[in-house]
Amino acid sequence: MNIPAMNLETLIQSTPVISVMGSPDVTVLGLSCDSRSVWAGDLFIAIPGSSENGIHFVREAIEKGAIAVVTAEDISRNEIPSIAGVPVVRVPDARVAMAALSSVFYGHPSASLAVAGVTGTNGKTTTAWIIRHLCDSVGRPCGLVGTIEYVLPGIVEPASRTTPESIDLQRMLAIMRDGGFRAAALEVSSHALMQHRIGGVEFDAAVFTNLTQDHLDYHGSMEEYFEAKRLLFTGLAKQTKKKGRAIINSDDRYGHRLLDRVQGVPIITYGQGSSCHFRASDIAYTAPGTIFRLDAKGRSYLVRTPLIGLFNVYNTVAALAATSAMGLELRRAIAAVATIPQVPGRLERVPVKRNFQAFVDYAHTPDALVNVLSTLRQLNPASIITVFGCGGDRDRAKRPLMAAAVEQNSDRVILTSDNPRGEDPLEIMNEAAGGFRAQGHESYVDRESAIRRAVEIAAPGDIVLVAGKGHEDYQETESGRHPFDDVRVTAHAMAGKEFDEREEARR
């Protein structure tokens, strides 16, 4: 990527400014919102964090070479003596400013790419994954920014968060553009929307998958959660370089509400309803995958996908609608659906041959658990044994709801620890157990013991589901992150081998 440089006075014209203290006639060589990663010549943007305000790190940033500061705080040189001689730009909102500055600094990279953004409680990862595959398959190299990994030209790295900060996101898009990519698939989280991380990104397609209870520890209520998701679509109407399209699941009740709340934007609906622009019907589940009919753009198509389950039909149709809005020829995209690769940790089959099957899935909400268990039931197992837990330091209200969903849709239930983080795992499990109606479940605080117990009791024709962590290769406890991979632990258990944490740490 060509390293940009820009005059600060020119750069700040892209965002509202309250005041400028000092001369803005300096050259900006980079952007940073983390004082620990400041380089000489950087513009330091002091944003509010969950526990600390960036304004407290201005001195450190300047000592490392920051040549200017952007902040929403009213500060003076007397309060921070070390900023003498360094221009300070005061703005109404530091995060809004950071997104605008990042887009301008990197040359509005989204304008040179066909960009799809996917939001919703469930299905974001799979839908974005499919979009990237479809674009790649028809000769449009596509980047990916999401929960599992970031895919850039010549680079694939584990994701640190679903949607990065705006500086990092714009930099990634610029790398895609300069590296010859023609498209990008982005997962857009509700946190990112509230924190303006996608500001300055212009979308060709914005996808709404569904909305079910999650993240209420952050949003407070389902209504606020819905309003956060809606920001992706209200942003489409404000775009200046593209006429983005809203791709909305009209079968979802919140999607149906969204249809009435999106103004001034072309809308494409998808689902099973007769009025949907992209309509799935005649769905059949087979051992190799799923077959369904798609009615779209005045024609009918037979679609074959290796992914199983009704929710994956929705994800696939959403991806087809999005890539159509991105300019892909629908027939070619449908042909590429047949070769969609396995999405890590999304109904991933454990590759060990036994007289029963085991799957690992990221499902960690009541609705997602119902969906995945309903899908597995369609495979006609003798019984379903589910291992699950609830994450710590997250929405506590959904814990008993998750337990109820698992109990109602499984034959045997094993409750265990997920990522307890800073909470006592036993207390988390006790809160979840409040959702059980019967006393037939088993409990193991140690997740490996729970998985081994499920494998031990599995009979011929059974299905074991290990839910909650999916693609993650760690378990996060009060003491930090420790190597733990549900697929590998389950595979070891099925093969009669021990799981060696030290060996995993070396992998």
Image (spheres, helix red, strand yellow):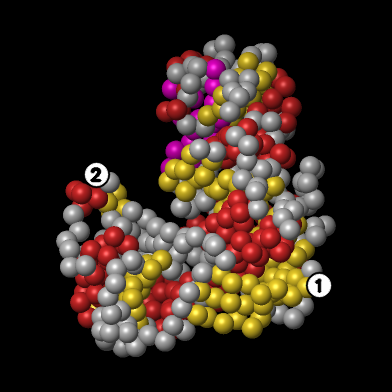
Q: Which residues are magenta?
A: 41-60
Q: Is residue 501 left or right of residue 253?
A: left
Q: Amino acid at mark 2?
A: Arg
Mark 2, residue position: 506
Q: Are marks 2 and 1 in contact (CB under 8 Å)?
A: no
Q: Give the crowd class for mark 1: few <14, some 14-19, many >=20 residues within 10 Å.
A: few
* Residue annotated with mark 1: 298
SS class, disc 1: loop
Q: Quadrant of residue 16?
A: top right
Neighbor class of circle 2 (other Cα within 10 Å; few <14, some 14-19, many 20+) is: few
- Circle 1: residue type: Gly
Secondary structure under tag 2 reads helix
- Seen as rendered, the residue at the extreme top is 85
Q: Residue at x 17, y 63 (%)?
A: 497
Residue 338 lies, with reference to residue 240, above or below; the image says below
Q: In front here: 87 or 234? A: 234
The location of residue 488, given as percent across then percent down, is 29, 60
* Residue under the point 34% across and 70% down: 466
How many angstroms separate mark 2 from mark 1 (CA)? 54 Å
Residue 113: where, in percent of width, then height?
Answer: 69, 43
The numbered mark, 2 or 1, whose residue comes first in the sequence reads: 1
Identify the residue shown where x is 64% and y is 68%. 317
Query: Quarter of the image holding residue 336?
Result: bottom right
